[in-house]
């Protein structure tokens, strides 16, 4: 099952799969990123800033993996990284305000990637991205 899901994910990410029109969401004009972020947080962590996935390093509201979180903090909030150890930066995933901000930045980045690839920007595609 995992292999099938991984293969399907690779095909979608590589652009080899496009669902039938009846299964596609229409692009959402003026999509409110904040609303999408709140849905993502609800699904990923049930709004629990201390949520931790037992099978990975995913932690916090947005369930960021260690490397993704470190990269996002370095890119978008270097002020938070200054003078902190890697472990301290990773602990910031448990700060609800910072986690929401970084989840929003991550979602905005994914929206831009989807647009550049000519793909629809919808709540569903943003969640999957």
Image (cartoon, grey):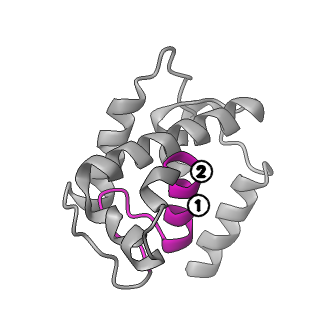
Determine whether, in the image, residue 87 is placed left or right of residue 41: right
Q: Secondary structure at mark 1?
A: helix
Q: Quadrant of residue 22?
A: top right
Query: Residue at the location (65% across, 33% down)?
Result: 112
For label 2, count other residues whose C-alpha is less than 10 Å away and answer few (under 14), some (14-19) or many (20+). few
> Could you say where residue 119 lies in the image, as x and y percent from the top left?
70, 33
Residue sitting nearer the eye, 79 or 44:
79
Tell me the residue that label 2 is attached to: 75
Q: Residue at x 52, y 53 (%)?
A: 78
The magenta region covers 57-77
Alpha carbon distance from label 1 to label 2: 6 Å
Describe residue 125's horizontal placement relative to residue 32 as left or right: right
Extreme-bottom residue of the structure: 55
Residue that numbered label 1 is attached to: 71
> Which residue lies at the image location 50% right of the left edge and 56% below the top edge?
73
Callout 1: 10 Å neighbours few (<14), some, many (20+)? Answer: few
Does 8 sit above or below residue 79?
below
């Amino acid at each position: 099952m995992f292999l099938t899901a991984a293969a399907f994910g690779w095909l979608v990410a590589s652009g080899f799969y496009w669902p039938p029109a009846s299964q596609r969401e229409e692009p959402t004009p003026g999509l409110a990123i904040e609303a999408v972020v709140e849905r993502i947080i609800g699904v990923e962590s049930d709004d629990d800033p201390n949520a931790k996935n037992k099978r990975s390093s995913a932690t916090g509201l947005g369930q960021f993996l260690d490397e993704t979180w470190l990269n996002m903090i370095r890119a978008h909030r270097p002020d938070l990284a200054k003078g902190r150890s890697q472990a301290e930066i990773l602990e910031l995933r448990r700060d609800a305000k910072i986690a929401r901000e970084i989840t929003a930045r991550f979602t905005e980045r994914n929206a831009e990637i989807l647009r550049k690839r000519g793909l629809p920007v919808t709540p569903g595609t943003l969640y999957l991205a």
